[in-house]
Structures are given as C-alpha cells and as structure tokens.
Amino acid sequence: MAVATKYVDREIPQISLLNFPQRIDEIAAAICNAAETVGFFAVKDHGLSEDEVQSMFTVSEAFFSLPDSKKATVPWSPQNVGWEKMSQVRPSTGEADTKESYQLQFGENMENLWIGDDDVPDFKKKSLEFMHRIQGISENIMLCLARGLGFEDDYFTKYHDVARPDSQSTLRLLHYYETPKTNDGIIRHRAGAHVDWGFLTLLFQRTGQSGLEICPGREAVTEHALGDAWTKVEFEPGVIVCNIGDLLMSWSDDRFKSTYHRVKAPCEEGDYFGERYSIAFFNQPVKDAIIQGPNKKYPVVTGEEFTRAAMNRNFGILKEKLAAKEKEKELREAKLATSAAQVQAAA
Ligand SMILES: O=C(O)CCC(=O)C(=O)O
Ligand SMILES: [Fe+2]
C-alpha cells in the first residue's frame, strides 16, 4: 500500500518590492534571511501585472497545443534551449518527467529555434517582452543578494547581462500532462525532486494547478541531504516564487541554500491530477563570468564551465540519446552511400 507523504509547515516569506529604490536595505535583509534559511521566498508588488503573466500563459498554451511534429522543428539542444518531451530524467528518480517543456534564451543559442509567427503569432516578440520584464525584477533581487554578500551592487547583474549574445538566462515554458487516477502502482513524476543548478529561479503558476513542494535541509552544495518531509507551495495571483540554485549556493560559499523541490507525482487524495502549466525563469551567468564566493570556499569556475558540468549532471541521459541518434543517422547514411557505390560499380 502506498505510504502517505509526510508534510510539514514551513514559512515561505512573502516580500514586497514596493518602492524598491527607497527600501533596498530592508528588502535585501528579508531576501537574504530567506535565502539563508528556507531557500525559497515569494516576491509581490514587483510591477508585473497579472494580465502580463496570464498573456504569457496563453502564448505558452498556444505553443503546446501545436502537433508534436511541429514542435519537433525547434528541438532541445545541449545549449539548454528548445523543446523536449518526456525526456528529462532526474538523477533523484532515474525516470523521465511526464511533461514537455520549451526553453528560450535571449541570445545566439536560439538561432533557428524560435517557433515561427505562422504557428504562434508573435511568439518571439511576446516571449522576449515577458523575459525582459522578469529580467528587470531579477536584477533588483540580484542587487539585494550582492549587498547581502558584501559585493558591489552591480556585481551579479553585470554577469547576467542579457544584452550579451552569450547570455544563458532561460525562460522555460512547462506543460505537465494530465495524470490518470489509477492504482496501477506506476509513479508518474511531474518534476522529480531536484535542485536548480542555476543562480536564481523565478516561478509562475496558475492558480489551482498546484503540486510544487519543497524540502529544505541542505548544508552544502556537496551534500545531498534529501529529507522526507515536504512543504506545499501554494500560489496566489500577484506573487512570484523565487528559489536559490546551486550556482548561487556555491557563489555564496554555501550561505544561501539551494533547496530540493519537486512537482509531486499526483497519487493521493487532495493532489492535483489535471493538466498543469507553469513558467520558470532561470537566471544564468554569461559564459566568461568568473565565479567564486567572498571566502573562496570553492575553486574559481567560469559560467561556461559551471553550465557544462550542470548540463552533464542533469541532461546526461538526454544528451547520450541525442548522440546515439546522431551516430545511428551517420551509420545509416554511410550504409546508403556504400550501397549506392556498389550499385554504381555493378552498373
Ligand atoms: O513547474 C514547476 O512548478 C517547477 C518546475 C521546476 O522546478 C523546474 O523546471 O526546475
Ligand atoms: Fe526546479
């Protein structure tokens, strides 16, 4: 018989960004306190309207309602962009999440990977507008985090400059499939337990489409203290849920915590089994960023090295599959070329 999930109440602070320029120190203290303890916090009064958020969800739904053959024209690539379906195997579960996602960036990695206006009108324009709006909010939070760590105010923002062609910050549109209510013993993971590997994540969800849960308890990036008690993160309109990623954890010498979270595989009374949309914005540094905490706890890495290592950890299986497919194609082409040569020789 399935064991009921153990839940525990933890406070996820809600922090108002109202009158940001006048209240920076107060806001920075609240954000850094949350980053040091629970690793998750919500921001409100950030200037982004509910209409803007819902319009982006509408754009996202329009994309996901295209046939798979169309979405496959903008496939996932190891630059961490593009569309994937049922293919992200989380190290914690060893199984693929039952979802599809489309990842978008500001710069050169997106070449040929934007879905065209014929398929979703103004997709690129609307997505970039939304991404710039979230970037603005992220920059305010980054200023607070820099102050808290004793860096110059622009220290993190200059390494997350999305005007640079090699910018790696990513908007991820997510679509989780409806989960059947059966007792067949199969666990249909939505997003298996994981920590985000980037700097800072901003999350948007639709009211009622619950499922996000967190499990704090990590003391160092090198430790994977995955506990067994979860806390549900409930969404309300107007809030953006933010969480610290591994990169900021190591960049802060483990002072700020990257927290385990998941979108629960629905299996118990009260879980949400329906189709679910969410949007995540991952702040990721430019490739030549020099990453090291104020106390130099970890060796220096560049943004590019950090991303490559994280991709291998998190998308290794998907990358291997792509490489195997590529190899198969090469072999098929080589075989075709050989038989064509034989036919010619015989003629
Ligand atoms: O869909 C969600 O609510 C969370 C997604 C997430 O944690 C991720 O993509 O890293
Ligand atoms: Fe995540």
Image (cartoon, grey):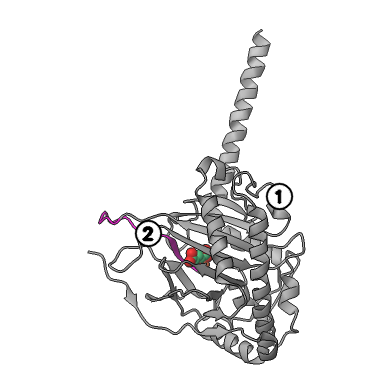
Name the residue: 60% across, 25% down: 335
185 falls in the magenta region: yes
Q: Which residues are magenta?
A: 181-194
Residue type highlighted by circle 1? Glu
Q: Quadrant of the N terminus?
A: bottom left
Residue at position x 70%, y 87% in the image: 21
Structural crowding at the residue carrying mark 1, measured as other residues with C-alpha within 10 Å and reported as few (<14), some (14–19) or many (≥20): few
Q: Main secondary structure of the magenta part?
A: loop
Residue 133 in percent (x, y) is at 66, 69
Q: Which mark is residue 254?
A: none
Where is residue 14? Give x, y as percent.
51, 83
> Callout 2: few (<14), some (14-19), or many (20+) C-alpha neighbours within 10 Å?
some
Q: Residue at x 62, y 72 (%)?
A: 199
Spot the residue most to the front. 51
Q: Which residue is mark 2?
A: 274
The residue at the far top in this view is 347
In reply to whether residue 255 is colored magenta, the answer given is no
209 horizontally vs 28: left or right = left
The disc label shown at residue 111, or none: 1
Q: Amino acid at mark 2?
A: Gly
Identify the element where label 1 is drawn.
Answer: loop
Q: Is residue 303 above or below residue 46?
A: above
